[in-house]
Amino acid sequence: MKTAKACQYNLSPQYLLKNTGAKISVYGRMIKFEHSIFALPFALSALLLAHRATPVTMSQFFWIIMAVVWARSAGMGFNRLVDAYWDGKNPRTAAREIPSGKISLIETTLFVVLTSFLFVFSALAISRICFWFSFPVLFFLFLYSYTKRFTWLSHLVLGFVQALSPLGVWLAVTGDFSLKIAVLSLALASYMVGLDILYACQDTEFDRREGLYSVPANFGVRRALRVSSLMHLLTFLSFLALYRVFDLSPFYLVFVAVIGFFLALEHAIVKPDDLSRINFAFFHVNSIVSLLLLVSMLTEELIRRFNIL
């Protein structure tokens, strides 16, 4: 008993560091930090495209990355908070951090408040217009978590929320909006809508039983996969449109062709009667797609900077 009590009040740097690291790891798992690889490359691509119009300073770069990270953290934390009841009932999600007791509802609430504040603060550090833009962004981030309670269009709401990222980055760098960057926003929106519909196929029966809305639950898995495919076709066409809109090099088209291959592969390996490969398609294939986009934009920046073509 004395040993346990002593450990409870252990304030040594080693003990505190170990426990702080463990807690951060738990929060990282709660918000699925590794999923940042899907949307963050789009934000960085928008940054590189905006850099063509207005050179990006190191200060802008730092605060833009901070804003993207904190916004996503706040949105995911809020989603886990309001979905905790259903996560606990769903066998697929019952082991998540809140249902399993690794993080309490109070801790998650404080996490959402803190990350929301840090997002707004980061936006203020960029510019006043970004500061005011941060509030509707948070509103729509939080709204998404409620939409599946009343509409199967929740996937489109997620796409709209994600589309705000390239727009926000462009605004942070240039100080205004542009229809040019809206093409990248459309690519990201359709990309995430397709992903979300694909991922929701796993919970079709659970959503129907609990009265939750999604494309798979409302229209069936087969139709949902078709809609997801159409969304990713729109993603591919949006990538092609970027070539004209931003006058990119032929090298970019090579990357787009490879992206198209992986998008097609993703839908080829997931069948209506066999969803066993959804996780592979969702995590691995889509990680490659996002990273290919970022590499293509880095290549374009090198070509432009060194006047290769």
Image: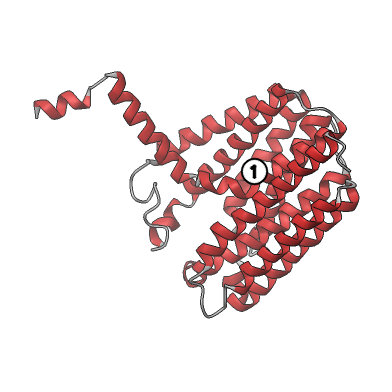
297 or 309: which is nearer to us? 309
- Quadrant that contains the C terminus: top right
Please state which of residues 121 and 232 is positioned toward the viewer in this rendering.
232
The location of residue 115, given as percent across then percent down, is: 55, 32
Residue 147 image point, x, y percent: 61, 56
Q: As drawn, is 5 to the left or to the right of 30?
A: left
In this rendering, the answer to whether 212 lies above or below 39 is below
Q: Quadrant of the N terminus?
A: top left
Can residue 213 be seen here? The reply is no
Outermost left residue: 1
As drawn, the residue found furthest toward the top would be 12
Q: In front: 301, or 186?
A: 301
Label 1's element? helix
Q: In the image, what residue occupies the spot 78% across and 49% down?
A: 184
Is residue 31 rendered to the left or right of residue 160? left
> Hey, what amino acid is under mark 1?
Leu
Rendered location of residue 81, percent (x, y): 47, 45
Number of other residues with Cα within 10 Å of mark 1, as a class: few under 14, some 14 to 19, many 20 or more: many
Q: Residue at x 64, y 43 (%)?
A: 40
Q: Is residue 11 above or below residue 173?
A: above
Q: Position of residue 134 (x, y in %)?
A: 69, 33
- Please say if 53 is above or below 260: above
On the image, which quarter does residue 102 sit in?
top left
Q: Is residue 245 among what the camera can see?
A: yes
Q: Residue furthest front?
A: 308
Judging by the rendered image, the residue that carries numbered circle 1 is 40
The relative height of residue 306 versus residue 141 in the rendered view (above or below) is: above
